């Protein structure tokens, strides 16, 4: 088609540049790791001591985690962050708030925040952070908010206007992830509460993966399209599923490098059908788990915060109550379902609901 080859060249060239930048930032540039020791100039988190008492999950995943050394362990064996979290992709001020909250609640530990406030998060030195931005400086200036300034200090922020979900994640190649044990993919419009009922606790997710030999794990998601990842009243089991939609998902790099990354392709910018096909494409050799003890919220569709998120979960979040994020549009490109057709993996009802118990508390299924 006229102009198509030029468009493909621009995408190819952009991806090449991204790969070079990511490698420099995450592999060869020590400053990315040094940002964990920087002092942030302000914080919106201010907790009363009793708010730390939010119940953490019981059962699997609570032992000493061999994958996560204790906070402050910088001895001879410490080799910097063992894991990488990527947020994709910020395009407006409202999503800066959710990303900022998730970064400092669960991934990037900053001693100055802990000293200045009673911080109830589970972040530590074991995570490096990258934030993808898909709009230019006119739409989202670098100084749009103090929260965005802090994100730029704490994470590698890659601004590549016009690219999409798959393009960003394709840059996280096996060579880029060579020194990491896990990679977490978190959407910019997901709220992962650290306090209140069923909070997210990343060290528990990591340990549960280790205990149950899971290749990837997610909390349950309010707003997920698939029944297999929606919260249910039980909330006390860890289950294996065939359909796992990516919202707040942690992968072992063995799974990411060995299969998942290979199926990300620039011709499918929003990875249509990948969630329903990946279980079959990877030969059923990787275990996909959902931790029903935790609940995160996808607020990017029609989930108004004040209607769908319990008030205790919002303590310290600094979110606008009626905030609703806009989805990144894909002009001129139809919803691509060729992957579903090619591999005959359009989900059946039973597959959508399948939740095989890997672990449950006593009486959890009654």
Image (cartoon, rainbow, N blue to C red):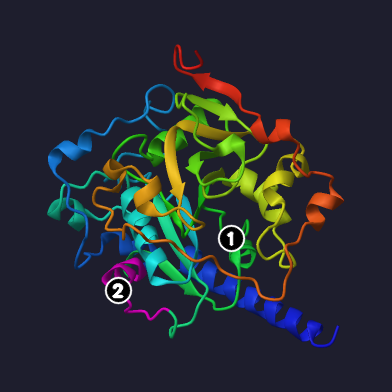
Q: Is residue 155 left or right of residue 173?
A: left
When the figure is inspected, residue 273 is found, relative to residue 200, above or below; the finding is: below
Describe the element under mark 1 as helix, strand or loop: loop
User: Residue at image x 80%, y 82%?
Assistant: 4
Q: Nearer the viewer, residue 337 or 40?
A: 337
Near mark 2 (Cα within 10 A), the count class, few <14, some 14-19 or many ≥20, is few
Is residue 30 visible in the rendered structure shown here?
Answer: no
Which of the two marks, 2 or 1, is nearer to us in this view? 2
The residue that disc 2 covers is: 145
Is residue 234 visible in the rendered structure shown here?
Answer: yes
Q: Is residue 285 left or right of residue 154?
A: right
Near mark 1 (Cα within 10 A), the count class, few <14, some 14-19 or many ≥20, is many
User: Mark 2 vs mark 1: which is more N-terminal?
Assistant: 2
Magenta segment boundaries in residue numbering: 140-152
Percent across and percent down for residue 168 are 58, 66
Describe the element under mark 2 as helix, strand or loop: loop
When the figure is inspected, residue 91 is found, relative to residue 340, above or below; the finding is: below
Residue 211 is marked as: none
Q: Based on the displayed image, in which of its 4 quarters is residue 261 positioned?
A: bottom right
Q: Is residue 148 magenta?
A: yes
The residue that disc 1 covers is: 172
When the figure is inspected, residue 116 is found, relative to residue 144, above or below; the finding is: above
Q: Nearer the viewer, residue 313 or 55?
A: 313
């Amino acid at each position: 088609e006229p102009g198509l080859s030029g468009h493909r060249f621009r995408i190819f060239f952009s991806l090449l540049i991204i790969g070079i930048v990511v490698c420099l930032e995450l592999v060869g540039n020590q400053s990315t790791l040094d940002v964990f020791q920087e002092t942030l100039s302000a914080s919106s988190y201010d907790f009363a001591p009793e708010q730390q008492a939010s119940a953490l999950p019981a059962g699997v995943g609570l032992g000493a985690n061999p994958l996560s050394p204790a906070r402050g362990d910088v001895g001879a064996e410490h080799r910097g962050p063992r894991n990488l979290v990527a947020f994709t992709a910020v395009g407006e001020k409202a999503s800066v708030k959710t990303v900022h909250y998730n970064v400092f609640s669960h991934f990037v530990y900053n001693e100055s925040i802990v000293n200045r406030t009673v911080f109830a998060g589970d972040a530590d030195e074991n995570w490096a952070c990258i934030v993808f931005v898909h709009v230019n400086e006119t739409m989202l200036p670098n100084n749009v908010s103090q929260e965005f300034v802090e994100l730029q200090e704490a994470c590698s922020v890659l601004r590549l206007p016009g690219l999409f979900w798959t393009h960003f994640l394709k840059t996280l190649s096996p060579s880029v992830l060579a020194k990491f044990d896990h990679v977490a993919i978190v959407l910019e419009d997901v709220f992962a509460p650290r306090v209140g009922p069923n909070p997210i606790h990343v060290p528990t997710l990591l340990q549960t993966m280790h205990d149950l030999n899971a290749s990837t794990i997610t909390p349950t998601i309010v707003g997920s399209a698939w029944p297999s990842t929606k919260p249910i009243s039980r909330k006390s089991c860890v289950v294996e599923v065939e359909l796992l939609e990516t919202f707040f998902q942690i992968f072992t790099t063995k799974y990411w490098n060995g299969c998942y990354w290979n199926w990300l392709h620039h011709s499918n910018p929003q990875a249509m059908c990948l969630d329903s096909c990946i279980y079959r494409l990877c030969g059923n050799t990787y275990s996909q788990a959902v931790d029903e003890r935790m609940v995160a919220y996808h607020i990017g569709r029609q989930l108004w915060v004040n209607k769908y998120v319990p008030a205790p979960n919002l303590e310290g979040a600094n979110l606008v109550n009626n905030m609703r994020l806009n989805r990144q549009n894909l002009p001129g490109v139809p919803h691509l379902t060729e992957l579903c057709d090619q591999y005959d993996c359009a989900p059946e009802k039973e597959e959508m609901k399948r939740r095989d118990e890997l672990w449950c508390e006593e009486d959890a299924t009654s």
